[in-house]
Image: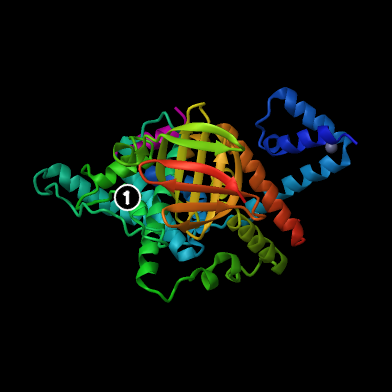
Amino acid sequence: MTDEKVLVSRAKDGDTEAFAEIVSLYQKAVYNSALYIAKNREDAEDIAQEVFLKLWRTLGSYREDASLKTWVARLTKNCALDYIRDRNKKSTSSLTDEDDGGENDVADEDISSNPEKSFEREERIKAVRKAVENLPGPIRETLILREFHDMSYAEIASALGISEGTVKSRVSRGREQVKEFLKNGNFL
Amino acid sequence: MENKICERVADLLSEYIDGGLDAKDAEFVRAHIENCAECRKAYGELLALEKLFDEAAEEVPEGFLSSVMERVAKEKQIADRKKKHPFVFSRKVGGFAIAAAVMLTVVASPLITSVLKNNVGGETDMEYVSSPEMAADDYLAGDRASPAEKNDGLYNAEAEVSFDGVKDVVESVKEEPYYGVDFGKYYTANMSDGRVGRVLLEDRGNATLEIDGESGSYSYEIMGGEIVLSDENGKLNFYLSYGDSISFNQVDG
Ligand SMILES: [Zn+2]
């Protein structure tokens, strides 16, 4: 058994320490995907927390024929859906905040909480975010799984229910588009 | 110029940096970029881009792990109590509501509402009992058939589909939710020749049409019962109408 499988089987038996190790393995990937969905850190953190609570609750039904990565990716998708559904409910009930994405966008935000990051670096990171946000949905979703969840083409195909060929072409085109965007802004 | 070869290399580069190519293709790419300055540059840019993606990934906020674990500990406590006193926590499935308040704030045509009915949600007082919500979770986690597949989500369409002037018959059309920066809906048409066409309609008006892995970006508008997809230069208009069936029809732009 791999280390991860050992962790999963211990967590299934209710071992919270083992579960904490699993969370540590995946938290960065999940949080970063959530950032692209919520576009602000507070909501991204909420989404990511929900993902791991769901993971805890559903471990019992997790069969190890799918990789844990794929499982986590599906749960992330699930929680993102819930989040967007809630957000849309809220935004239809108040007419004023039709576009609340503007000021809170992570892509527009100062990253001054990390003073050692240079200005150029901040600008570069913002540009990457903007570029990814500008991608058509399916391409963005696929590219995020490749770049942030470090999933293989096969794993992404299984998580999204699409063919590996489609994954390959989306990843390739997504990278091409992000590259062009960054080149236009002299970031690459 | 080795234009054709460079094009082929450009197609393979992304997979090359992911280490996904077989030995023969990988060697072909490696040998070519050694000798072709232009492709070597494209390769270098792609590697630089990967570094940028790494750089752009943020660390989780401080205290993230401990707040997750606090909530997990609480749930575990409840579950343990439930094990000891199986009758204390009664199974109560409530709020079996239809979550139709979702998305597409656009036009609430009867056609759209009928599609939205597939989003069956629900709540339970305990997450450990089986509930419609858990079933939905299981579905998303790949465990069960889509709730949508059990009712109206799967259309047995007798629609005709026409892409690039070639007509085909749609065997079935499936509608499913989609997440992204926008909320959206995916419509998948399975055609009789085995090809699959998918249209994604995102909340803010972006549409993506995919057929056999090829895709195009469009904007869309809902007009009456029809959804009109058009691309930037107006050359292609697809319209998607749905009722008992969904059809994709290409019309002149
Ligand atoms: Zn070349």
Most extreme residue toward the front, as rendered? B252
Q: Position of residue B10 (x, y in %)?
A: 76, 38
Q: Is residue A110 above or below residue B145?
A: below
Which color scheme is applied? rainbow
**Magenta span includes B36:** no
Does the image show residue A3? Answer: no
**Magenta span includes A9:** yes
| Mark 1 secondary-structure assignment | helix
Question: B213 or A37, which is in the foreground?
Answer: B213
Magenta span: helix, strand or loop, mainly?
helix
Q: Quadrant of residue A58?
A: top left
Disc 1 residue crowd, few under 14, some 14–19, many 20+, Cα 10 Å: some
What quarter of the picture does the N terminus of chain A occupy?
A: top left
Question: B212 or A83, which is in the foreground?
Answer: B212
Q: Position of residue A85 (x, y in %)?
A: 38, 58
Amino acid carrying label 1: it is: Ser
| A98 sits left or right of B250 in the view | left
Question: B13 or A24, which is in the foreground?
Answer: B13
What quarter of the picture does the C terminus of chain A occupy?
A: bottom right
Q: Position of residue A142 (x, y in %)?
A: 55, 44
| B215 sits left or right of A44 in the view | right
Q: In this picture, which residue range is highlighted in magenta?
A: A1-13
Q: Residue at x 60, y 71 (%)?
A: A110
Q: Which residue is mark 1?
A: B114
Q: Is residue B51 above or below residue A66?
A: below
Q: Which quadrant of the render holds ligand 1?
A: top right
Q: Position of residue B203 (x, y in %)?
A: 47, 58
Most extreme residue toward the bottom, as rendered? A96
Q: Residue at x 54, y 73 (%)?
A: A103
